[in-house]
Amino acid sequence: MKLTSTAFENEGNIPRNYTCDGAGISPPLTISNVPTDAVSLVLIMDDSDVPKSIRPDGIWDHWIVYNIPASTTEIAEGEEPAGVHGLGTGKNTNYYGPCPPDGMHRYYFNLYALDTRLDLPINSTKKQVMDAMKQHVLAKAILIGRYKKEGT
């Protein structure tokens, strides 16, 4: 399975438009090679470079969407995918663009193909989603983008 973006390359810099310094809209994403027996997809975007003084676990969850149809091949720029939205660290239920408090941070767009749909309510946390996914992951793809907030 593969997750790519026409806006930035894997390990490349995320353009300003998709961050708190710009419009803060979601980047375009392309999904390919999903296993034929996949029932649903899960998309989780997080930043694991958060200072421990801000978040003891060092992670900020920016975007959590589950029960995305397995037939999904793209998520258009500025759009939310069809599916159930989880609750991000900032209490957001939609895409929350990169806005690092210090220096360059890495943003992981994690895509999972599952053999089931998750029986979870709207606004579930990443931990709840990850726990429910155990034993159901058929494939995983990661797209990493980097961003340094202007003026830091």
Image (cartoon, rainbow, N blue to C red):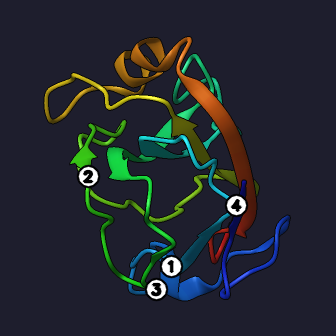
* Spot occupied by residue 132 in the image (x, y as percentages of width and height): 39, 15
Select label 4 or label 1 by which is in front.
4
Q: In the rendered image, which residue does mark 1 sit on? A: 18
- Packing grade of label 1 (10 A; few <14, some 14-19, many >=20) is many
Q: Secondary structure at mark 2?
A: loop
Select label 2 or label 1 by which is in front.
2
Which numbered disc flags the more N-terminal residue, 2 or 1?
A: 1
Which numbered disc flags the more N-terminal residue, 4 or 1?
A: 1
Amino acid type at circle 2 is: Gly
Amino acid type at circle 3 is: Gly
Looking at the rendered image, the quarter that the C terminus falls into is bottom right
Q: In the rendered image, which residue does mark 4 sit on? A: 33
- Packing grade of label 3 (10 A; few <14, some 14-19, many >=20) is few
Q: In the rendered image, which residue does mark 3 sit on? A: 22
Query: Badges 1 and 3: C-beta atoms under 8 Å apart?
Result: yes
Query: Badges 2 and 1: C-beta atoms under 8 Å apart?
Result: no
Which numbered disc flags the more N-terminal residue, 3 or 2?
A: 3
Q: Secondary structure at mark 1?
A: helix
**Which residue lies at the image location 73% right of the left edge and 64% below the top edge?**
145
- Residue 64 position (above or below residue 125): below
Which numbered disc flags the more N-terminal residue, 3 or 4?
A: 3
**Residue 138 lies in quadrant:** top right
Disc 4 to disc 2, C-alpha distance? 19 Å
Q: Which of 62/122 is in front?
A: 122
- Residue 115 position (above or below residue 113): above
Select label 3 or label 4 by which is in front.
4
Q: Which of 35/142 is in front?
A: 35
